[in-house]
Amino acid sequence: MSADLPRKRIIGYADKLSLAPGETIAFKASCEDIAQYRADIVRLVCADLHPQGRGWIEEEIATPVSGSYPGREQAIPVGSWALVESALGLCSQSLTVALQLWPTTPHKGEQALLARMDIAGSRGWMLLIDDAGAIALRIATAEGVTTVSTGVAVQERVWSFVGASFDAASGAIRVWQRPQKTWPGHDATGDGEGSARGTLDTAGLSLGIAARPGRVEGPRRFCLDPCNGKLEAPRLYGRAMEAGEALALQETAARERSLIAAWDFARDTMGERVRDTGPSAHDGCLINVPTRAMTGHNWDCSVMDWKAAPQQYGAIHFHDDDIADSGWETDFALTVPQGLKSGIYAARLVAGEQSDHIPFVVRAPRGTATADALFLMPSASYLAYANEHGAIESAGAMDAFSGHLSGLSAQDLLLGERPDLGYSLYCHHGDGSGVAVSSRLRPVLNMRPGVTNAWVGPAGTFPWQFNADLPLVDFLEHEGFAFDVATDEDLHDEGLDLLSRYRVVLTGSHPEYYSKPMLDALDGWLQRGGRLMYLGGNGFYWRVAFHPEIKGVMELRRGEDGIRDWVSQGGEYYQAFDGAYGGMWERQGRPIHALAGVGMAGQGFDISGFYRRTAASRDPRAAFVFEGIEDEIIGDFGTVGGGAAGIEVDRCDFAKGSPPNTLVLASSEGLSDLYYPGPEEIDNARPFMDGSQNPNLRADMTFHETAGGGAVFSTGSIAWIGSLSWNGFDNNVAGVTANVLRRFLDPEPFQGIGKTTT
């Protein structure tokens, strides 16, 4: 399409992901070249576009929302920074500004470090990295704009003490940079001198840290010239000084009468305030959730937990592509009618051939359950994968990884065009650092019905995450099982109180990301007699934390093990949101095996295999699982790779904590040599590790009883749910699932009598 032709698009998001009857959800849309669109509320049942799938099934719900709405384009205020509101005490004719800097993209263009300058750049001052990658000070007065630079590019990913001063009486400007390390031929030490004319006027101007304040539209704060890198200990003084004096004041923390502000990023690390320890407490607010609890210039490698030595974790990593909240204005809102059944719904937006679905969950009325079974929608995993760019960032590598060409959808192409939509926890920021924070307060293009993943399956044909879980809803509806739906966020917020209302919990295909409150609640519920149907693979794998102040924002630190697209820097494994050690749950003494009977064995993204029953499948304890099913082979069909066992698979492993009473009812066959174990499974590289040769790389279907009279059934495969609807639900995968669910709904306690067989 020619660049000068209109590109009609409509995308949106909601302020909530789940809500109960009587509560209100607000929908926000942005339209490109669309003057008007229609909105309706629909209940989602299925969006399986596989030739053998059930197709698109949605039910329109009559609500006051239905109708036409004017289209308007809404921009996203991308980039993280800190805003300090204008105050008389911040004003000074003479000044010195200084901070510690660890730049990650010094040559990307102008980047503001500290700035009190108007949008036009005609009034105020700004300490910046200039177009040459050097530290500079810009003074803008009625007499003109003057920029003085050191002329020497700062060294990328090397701590430097940088700063500048302006003497109002003489007009003299000094700029400096002092790297912590130098090498022969790579000395980034620099100084610059110059002068400016006129009186410096900053009245009414806000101060920006890591960006220059831009326009304000309601709650949205736009910034200019955002920077990439770590900033630490910004200080502002009311007189001009030289580099040596400013550095001495930084190192000694001596009280200086001219000190205006000294922001200490090591304080209130879990929150969104930056604290000023100076005389007037000019605190600021963080925008778009930059990454906190970062090692500072003085980190000596002796401490790994920021809480143990906060003075060594005084840095914040800012990114010019961070986004936590798009802040769009509301187009329309829905108050969920009383009596609307629990389920997965969406606001459907349509303008001609353009459309978007914004999913949300309607829960049971607060404090109640309307069924004995709960589908616990793995929204934390959806959030981890939100707007994943894998095939866009590295298509060739992903093709080799998955064994087939990627298939870019319209959503993928839009993500490549619109970096302001943000990234997933599998992506890298523009400066190369891993994305550690994800938010749902933005359009999440791959959390949509009908969407497939660009690199999962040939040409991206396999459903993934949200769309891969809808067949479970279709199955439950078709088979007549009553069920409620809740999300991971609900579980995180309400814990055991939520689960205690249900006899059975069913997972989605890939519940990979779990916070501690979530895991504690699920484990405690099982010990009290709950029944868990784990219908996925690679579940309960990574530890995450939800933001303590901003709903819908989640953090991940990828630690020293596990399948990772990036790795956290040394010393930065502890999460900022809750202070806990990040990484794999297995490496923290809580392997999935102990919870679900199986744990991650490996992954592959080309085809799926099937299960073959074991002798244990004839054990009387598991007779209910295969009632009416005589087949030896289970699941040699499906919309996800042609089988029920695949993509990411889990196996029983008693050495890793699988309960001793676990029955291995069936094990997978048919995995290809493009399946490989995760790093945690490899103590040393060796041949015969792939899926066609490694007996430990398999999916196990398991069952075990719990001490509280409950039980756990696990399929150990992401692909399982994709086989449920095959042949109109007349298949043995649907049969096994229905058998287990019927028995799990039966209040009769499980006894667990008998010896384990495998």
Image (spheres, rainbow, N blue to C red):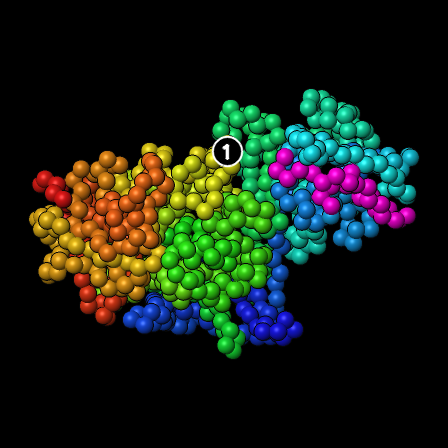
Q: Quadrant of the C terminus?
A: top left
Rendering coords of residue 599 (x, y %): 28, 44
Q: Position of residue 265 (x, y in %)?
A: 61, 34
Which residue is nearer to you in this view: 751 or 391?
391
Q: Main secondary structure of the magenta part?
A: strand
User: What residue is at 44 percent from the left and 34 percent from the top?
Assistant: 581
Asked where in the image residue 725 lies, by quadrant, the reply is bottom left
- Would you name the residue on which mark 1 appears? 570
Q: Is residue 486 left or right of residue 619?
A: right
Q: Quadrant of the N terminus?
A: bottom right
Q: Is residue 339 left or right of residue 290?
A: left
Number of labelled discs? 1
Q: Which residues, given as a range, are shown in magenta?
A: 132-158
Q: How many C-alpha atoms fall within 10 Å of the one at disc 1: few (<14), some, or many (≥20)?
A: few
The image quarter containing residue 150 is: top right
State left or right for residue 383 relative to residue 600: right
675 vs 374, nearest the viewer: 675
Q: Secondary structure at mark 1?
A: loop
Q: Amino acid at mark 1?
A: Gly
Q: Is residue 317 magenta?
A: no
Residue 135 image point, x, y percent: 74, 40
- Asked if residue 508 can be seen in this view, the reply is no
